[in-house]
Each structure stands twice: as structure tokens, then as C-alpha cells.
Amino acid sequence: MKRILLVEDERQIARMVQAYLSREGYKVEVAFDGEEGWRQFQALAPDLVILDLMLPRLHGLELARLIRGASGVPIIMLTARAEEADRVAGLELGADDYVTKPFSLRELAARVRAVLRRVEGAGSHKVIEAGPLRIDLAAREVRLAGMPVELTPTEFDLLSFFARHPGRVFTRTELLEAIQERSYASLPRTIDSHIKNLRHKIEPDPSQPTYIVTVHGVGYKFQPPREGG
């Protein structure tokens, strides 16, 4: 049974989400403020975190930063604020999905299933190598010059999708549809946040990327190093 940590200070919403996801077959633990959420995260090692942004005692973005510094566990963020800046801030910290209040419990459960399904992967044993970059699709592991690279689930999905289609140019919407099952269809620019994070982790010089290249006016492509180059 997958364990979910829900950090939400609005108790009525928290109890409704807990009850609904429990009926969906998940073990759901609840924390009502950011500090309690951090303590429970450390104690429980959950499979997924659902995290409200506006939390007492420790802001949701700060909690997300702590979680992401300690683990690649998937994070779905909740907020009553609909501004794009808030969504992008969460994504740049490594959140995997974003749900704006008010939301339907059915939609939230679908997002949870989609994120967990991506993490579990398709069971392929293929390993992709591009110069010093090695991507193990089955183990969901990435190494750069032999050293492990810690990626969030969404970052791994994005990188592996790129690597499976070298040289092909994708629009932002195509990338989101491929890795998020249309979760971010209304906000294509959020892909830029994930790519920015990826570049900082795999590129020798993120300001002049060589793996994930911008195609101006279109989108992005994955460019493997040339042999002998």
C-alpha cells in the first residue's frame, strides 16, 4: 500500500482528502502545519507528498525545499492562489504537479495515480548512454561521469523522454503531454522550470547547454555529444 503524507492546515479539506484517498487504497497521514509536516516526512518516508503552500509555522515552499533537499519523493502542491508565479516557484523547487483550490477529489486522485505510475515506470531494462550521461530507465537512475545525479520524478521522466528521441524538437505542450498526461496543459511555460533544473544538474555550463538545447520559437531538443567530440 502506497503511503501519502498530506500537509494541509484547513482541517475540513484535509479530512475530506484523507477519507477519499483512503477509499482509493492509499495509506494517508495528515499534518496540519509545516513543522509537523517536516517531522512526519522524516519519520514516515512516504511514497508521495501532497503539500499546501499556505501553511502556518513553516511555509509550504520552505517545506518543499527541505523535502527536496533530502529526497526525490514526488510532490503535488496545493494552493488557493492561482498566480503563475506561485506555480512556477513550486515547480522550480522540484514539485511534480500542481493543483489549485478549489479542486475535485476525483481530479486530485487522478493526479496522484499519474505521478505514482510515472515513478513506478514501465519496467523497461533499456539503458541510454549519451557521452558521460547514463540513464537507466528500469532503475530510474542517472549517472554523469559515473557519479549519481539526484533527479525528481518529473525531471527523470523529462530527461528520459528527451533521450529516447534524440535530435527531435518538441514544443512545450508536447513535452507536458508526454510526461504529465496533460496535468499542466493549461500552463505550457512550466516546462521551462523543469528544464532549468535539469540543466543545472547535468550540464557542464547551464548557461550554455549542450544536452538540452533551446530551439528558438519552437521548443527544445536533446542533443547527444558527437562521437569523438
Image (spheres, grey):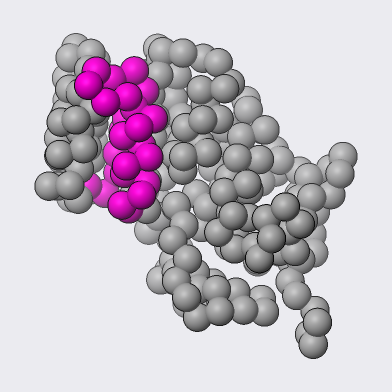
Write the residue at 36% across / 37% down.
Answer: 64
Q: Is residue 66 left or right of residue 190?
A: left
Q: Is residue 118 left or right of residue 201?
A: left
Write the residue at 66% across / 65% down.
Answer: 204
Residue 108 place in picture, x, y as percent: 37, 28
Q: Nearer the viewer, residue 146 or 215?
A: 146
Q: Is residue 107 visible?
A: no
Quadrant for the C terminus in the image: bottom right
Write the residue at 66% across / 40% down.
Answer: 192
Q: Is residue 22 left or right of residue 74?
A: left
Residue 10 place in picture, x, y as percent: 23, 13
Residue 25's quadrant in the figure?
Answer: top left
Q: Which residues are magenta?
A: 46-71
Q: Nearer the viewer, residue 44 or 101?
A: 44
Residue at the farthest right position? 217
Please tell me whether residue 67 belongs to the stretch shown in magenta. Answer: yes
Residue 68 place in picture, x, y as percent: 37, 46
Residue 21 place in picture, x, y as percent: 23, 32
Residue at the farthest bottom position? 228
